[in-house]
Structure formats: structure tokens, C-alpha cells
């Protein structure tokens, strides 16, 4: 059996693994990526938020991505009946990028891995991890390619960016129950033949059908649009077992979008993601670290998935680089505590979205521009900016403000 010796092995070539691998390669580290699937492949996470641009830039991937004609995303729109709330990323509390992209992940991830391979990063597609043995901080990983050929990789450090594959969490039984209630989604793409000209046709929107049920609309620059329905698992299941019929039923409930999408055929059979929120008991161990969806996936409502994937992938790569140089790393303080800080902020916002409290703030009239700017910074992914009171006091500020709004509305009746 063939044996390879490398400094860092990365499992998964999605955004988290790619950012990690690109950064390490840039730093001159011997790195290899193994990816179970063949790219391009269809996955969710098609709406990015501005914070990811910082991470792609630091990893050295941004110049290549800017060469593609991905749909520019300058904000996000939330719709509730006749009420509309629009966030402009250029008008936010925190410093940072004021735009990002809406992307077909199949094309986007392929663009990233093409650039990595052009730079010389070793990526083995259609290669599955069969087993991992840890010897101190080193790992011995057995993998198998599509032809059934097995080989062993000896690595000085392991980064698990395998997403929902969750290779290390499954092997070491690290999986934990999510803090969020069970939700599911059904999504597909359509050829957007009824798309309007200008901003209306290209704007990402979240159409609230009920307090806990919403439709996503993510237009791409290639003329296609991603459509998805999200809600409590019981609700999604009640739409029926046929995902095509279920998504069609959901679109019929949207007064705003029924004319645009009501009779358009789906490009592929709608896919169902059941109980998608996941967590782990710990994010790191002796010789390994978990990144991206291997650690935690929250909810698609604020497009935080790729943000945490790239944030954790980049930080993990930096710390792994330090460790293989013989520099002591406090993985709890420098990695887990930091990542969890951002996860906690977004978890609060997601919970308060589904209670309806955050929706009260979104749609309250007249708007409070300063409150909106602070919330916009969170939606842009700047959830580590403790100068923002809507980050620092996330556990209480939304709930308290929603309570005041409701009391004021009752007093005015």
C-alpha cells in the first residue's frame, strides 16, 4: 500500500477546506486535500455575506474569483406580506466589505478548486476517508479512490472540513444535539424566464409565508435562480413526500413571487435537507481540528454557513501552521472560544427570528436607522465586533426591543 507523508491533511474541498489549504500552501506548508465527491456538485450555501470576502482575500483566492461574473450581492431583502425591509451592506455599523456574491455553488466551488490546482495544491477528488488512527498529534489516514485503490497518508496535523460528511465527528462520536429546534428545507433551481430588469430581478429575498416558514429567492448571473422553502420539520413534512409537489405548494403561498415562479419548471428534482442543524461536543483534539459544517451548521436564514466555514477554515490553518512550527497553540482560547463567540451571536438571531421578535425589529415603522445599521453589520457577518451593542448584548437586546415595540403598539391601539 502506497504511503504519503505531509504536514497537513485536509478532508473536504468546499469553502472551508479550500480556504485552509490555500492559506497553508501560500505559507509553504506541505498540504493535501481529499474530497469524496467530484466537482462540480450541487450543494446549498448559495448566498454569501461580506465577511467571507476578507477570508477569501487572506487565503489568496479573491483575485481569481473576481475574474468570474458571479452575481453581486449588495444587501438582502425580507418580505412579509406587503411589508418590505431592505438591508444595504454599505450602510452598516462595522467596518468591512459592503458587498459579496450570490453563487451557484457548483460553479463557485469548482472555480476555487481550479485556482488551487493551478497554484499547485494537491487535491484528490473522488477519494473517501476509510479510517483515521491518531498517534499523538500525528494521524494515519487510510483513503480509497473511485477505483478502489487504497493508500495511507501520514500527516502531522488533520483539518476536518468534510461538511455534512463529518468524518472525524462520526468516527470519534463527537456529534451533539443542536441548540436550535428541528428545521428542514427543500430547494431547486429554475431558469428565471420571468425575471424583471434591474435590481428587482437580481435581489436576494426572503419571503415570510408564516412566522416560522419562509421562501428563499437567490438569483444568479447565469439567468437561473435558486428557490427554497424552509420551516419546522413537521411543516415541511406536511407538504408531502414528493419534493416537487411540496415546493410547488410552497411557491403558491407566496403572493409576491407566485407570478414569477408559479408555473416555471424545475431544473433538477428538488432536494430535501431534513433536520439540517448540527453541532459537536468539541471542535478540536490532539492533532486535529474541525471546521465549517463539521463543527456546526445553524440555519440558512441569514446565510451564515459559508461565513463560518471560511472563518473557521482560515483560523484553523493559521493555528495549524503555528503548531507544526513547534509553537504552542491554545486551541480552546485561540480557536473554539473565538468561533463559538460568533456562533452564539448568530444562534441568538436565528432563534429570535423564529420567535418573531427579530421580525418585529425588521418591519417596525418608522425605521430606526441606527438600530438597522447595527443589525445590518451582524447580517454582513461582522459578529465578532464587540463595539456593536447588537453583538455584545445579543442575548437581550433583540428580545427587549421587540417587547418595547409590542408594548408601544398596544398603547397606541
Image (cartoon, rainbow, N blue to C red):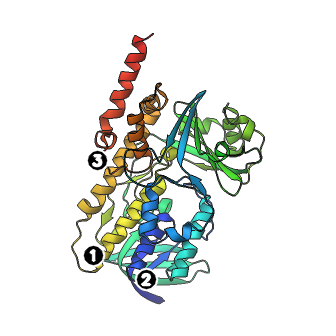
Q: Is residue 216 visible?
A: yes
Mark 1 Cα shell of 10 Å, populated few (<14), some (14-19), many (≥20): some
Where residue 204 sits, quadrant-wise, is top right
* Residue 16 coordinates in the image, percent (x, y): 45, 64
* Location of mark 1 (residue): 323
Eyeballing the image, is 135 above or below 237?
Answer: below
Helix, strand or loop under label 2: strand
The C terminus sits in image quarter: top left
Residue located at (39% from left, 76% from top): 24
Eyeballing the image, is 279 above or below 183?
Answer: below
Distance from the alpha carbon under mark 1 to that under mark 2: 19 Å
> Which label's residue is closer to the chain start, 1 or 3?
1
Disc ID at residue 386: 3
Helix, strand or loop under label 1: helix
The answer to which of 103 and 323 lies nearer the viewer is 103
* Location of mark 2 (residue): 153
Mark in the foreground, 1 or 2: 1
The answer to which of 278 and 110 lies nearer the viewer is 110
In the displayed structure image, the side of residue 15 where residue 252 appears, left or right: right
Q: Which residue extends farthest top?
A: 413
Mark in the foreground, 1 or 3: 3
Distance from the alpha carbon under mark 3 to that under mark 2: 41 Å
In the displayed structure image, the side of residue 61 where residue 137 appears, left or right: left
Amino acid at each position: 500500500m502506497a504511503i504519503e507523508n505531509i504536514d497537513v491533511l485536509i478532508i473536504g474541498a468546499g469553502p472551508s477546506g479550500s480556504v485552509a489549504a490555500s492559506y497553508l500552501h501560500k505559507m509553504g506548508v506541505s498540504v493535501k486535500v481529499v474530497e469524496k465527491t467530484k466537482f462540480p456538485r450541487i450543494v446549498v450555501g448559495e448566498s454569501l455575506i461580506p465577511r467571507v470576502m476578507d477570508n477569501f482575500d487572506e487565503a489568496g483566492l479573491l483575485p481569481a474569483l473576481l475574474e468570474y461574473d458571479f452575481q453581486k450581492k449588495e444587501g438582502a431583502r425580507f418580505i412579509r406580506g406587503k411589508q418590505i425591509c431592505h438591508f444595504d451592506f454599505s450602510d452598516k455599523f462595522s467596518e468591512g466589505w459592503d458587498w459579496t456574491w450570490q453563487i451557484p455553488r457548483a460553479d463557485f466551488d469548482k472555480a476555487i478548486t481550479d485556482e488551487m490546482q493551478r497554484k499547485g495544491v494537491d487535491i484528490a477528488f473522488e477519494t473517501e476517508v476509510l479510517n483515521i488512527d491518531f498517534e499523538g498529534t500525528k494521524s494515519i489516514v487510510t483513503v480509497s479512490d473511485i477505483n478502489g485503490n487504497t493508500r495511507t497518508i501520514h500527516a502531522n496535523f488533520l483539518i476536518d472540513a468534510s461538511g455534512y460528511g463529518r468524518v472525524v465527528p462520526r468516527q470519534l462520536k463527537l456529534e451533539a444535539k443542536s441548540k436550535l429546534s428541528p428545521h428542514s428545507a427543500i430547494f431547486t433551481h429554475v431558469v428565471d424566464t420571468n425575471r424583471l430588469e434591474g435590481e428587482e430581478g437580481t435581489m436576494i429575498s426572503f419571503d415570510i409565508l408564516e412566522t416560522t416558514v419562509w421562501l428563499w429567492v437567490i438569483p444568479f448571473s447565469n439567468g437561473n435562480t435558486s428557490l427554497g422553502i424552509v420551516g419546522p420539520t413537521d411543516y415541511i413534512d406536511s407538504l408531502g413526500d414528493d419534493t416537487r409537489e411540496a415546493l410547488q405548494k410552497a411557491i403558491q403561498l407566496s403572493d409576491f413571487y407566485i407570478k414569477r415562479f408559479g408555473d416555471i419548471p424545475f431544473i433538477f428534482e428538488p432536494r430535501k435537507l431534513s433536520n439540517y442543524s448540527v453541532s459537536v461536543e468539541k471542535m478540536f483534539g490532539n492533532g486535529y481540528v474541525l471546521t465549517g459544517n463539521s463543527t456546526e451548521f445553524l440555519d440558512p436564514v441569514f446565510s451564515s454557513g459559508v461565513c463560518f466555514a471560511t472563518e473557521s477554515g482560515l483560523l484553523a490553518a493559521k493555528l495549524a501552521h503555528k503548531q507544526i512550527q513547534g509553537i504552542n497553540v491554545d486551541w480552546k482560547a485561540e480557536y473554539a472560544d473565538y468561533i463559538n463567540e460568533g456562533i452564539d451571536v448568530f444562534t441568538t438571531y436565528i432563534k429570535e427570528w423564529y420567535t418573531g421578535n427579530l421580525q418585529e425589529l425588521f418591519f417596525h415603522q418608522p425605521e430606526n436607522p441606527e438600530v438597522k445599521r447595527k443589525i445590518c453589520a451582524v447580517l454582513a457577518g461582522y459578529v465578532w465586533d464587540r463595539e456593536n451593542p447588537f453583538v455584545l448584548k445579543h442575548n437581550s437586546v433583540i428580545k427587549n426591543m421587540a417587547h418595547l415595540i409590542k408594548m408601544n403598539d398596544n398603547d397606541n391601539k
